[in-house]
Amino acid sequence: MVSLQEQLLKAGLVNKQKVKVANHEKSKQQKLERRTGVQTVDPVREAALELRRKQAERARELNAQRDAAAAEKAVAAQIAQMVQQNRQGKGGGELAYNFAIGTRIERIHVSEKIRDHLVAGRLAIVALGDTFELVPRAIADKIAERAPESVVRTNKTSPEVDADDPYAEFKIPDDFNW
């Protein structure tokens, strides 16, 4: 392997006198460092190390962003696959089932049997893109583990009754429509 000095001499960029002076200065600096025990700071080397460190940090950030985007895409694909494989028909019914998404009220038309399953908590409503699908409760629970914002409506199978509720003894009839 040919050293940089030899390459510069061969190219004619430096002469032997300049190489000799540079080697002499370098050896004086090394002797001074050994004698005093203080390392001199090479600003060019420090700048190069800092630049390399910043580039490595930026590369780690980009890789983390890329990995997060890939994981998010994989979760979305898993949810779409679970909904497509396990969605239930709406029964083509005439009953309007209303549910809230944030501050909006949405409505789907279902049969009475499907509405009973929704009220009992055996079926759940899941948002898939701009549409709403009905899936079994077990599948909705799996979807909620991955992306809780996808599960729009799940009724609890056993309603929790507050001990201080003055209306606890009055039950809402099942056939009550808003």
Image: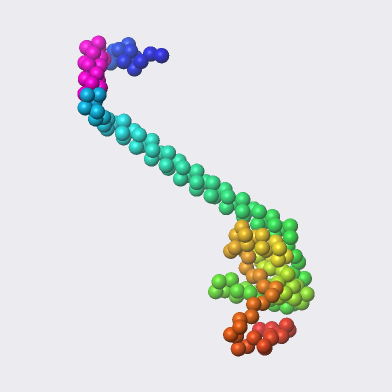
Q: Is residue 143 visible?
A: yes
Is residue 37 depicted above or below 9 in this figure? below
Q: State left or right for residue 121 relative to residue 14.
A: right
126 and 47: which is toward the camera: 47
Q: State left or right for residue 1 relative to residue 168.
A: left
Q: Is residue 19 magenta?
A: yes
Quarter containing the C terminus: bottom right
Q: Main secondary structure of the magenta part?
A: helix
Q: Magenta span covers which residues?
A: 14-32
Residue 150: image quadrant is bottom right
Q: Residue 140: horizontal and vertical position, in percent? A: 67, 63
Q: How many marks?
A: 0
Residue drawn where x is 45% and y is 41% of the image = 59
Q: Is residue 29 visible?
A: no
Q: Residue 72: horizontal and vertical position, in percent? A: 57, 52
104 and 61: which is toward the camera: 61
Q: Residue 124: horizontal and vertical position, in percent? A: 69, 68
Q: Is residue 11 magenta?
A: no
Q: Residue 24: horizontal and vertical position, in percent? A: 22, 16
Is residue 175 depicted above or below 15 in this figure? below
Residue drawn where x is 70% and y is 66% of the image = 137
Q: State left or right for residue 157 relative to residue 38.
A: right
Residue drawn where x is 67% and y is 88% of the image = 170
164 and 175: which is toward the camera: 164
Residue drawn where x is 61% and y is 83% of the image = 163
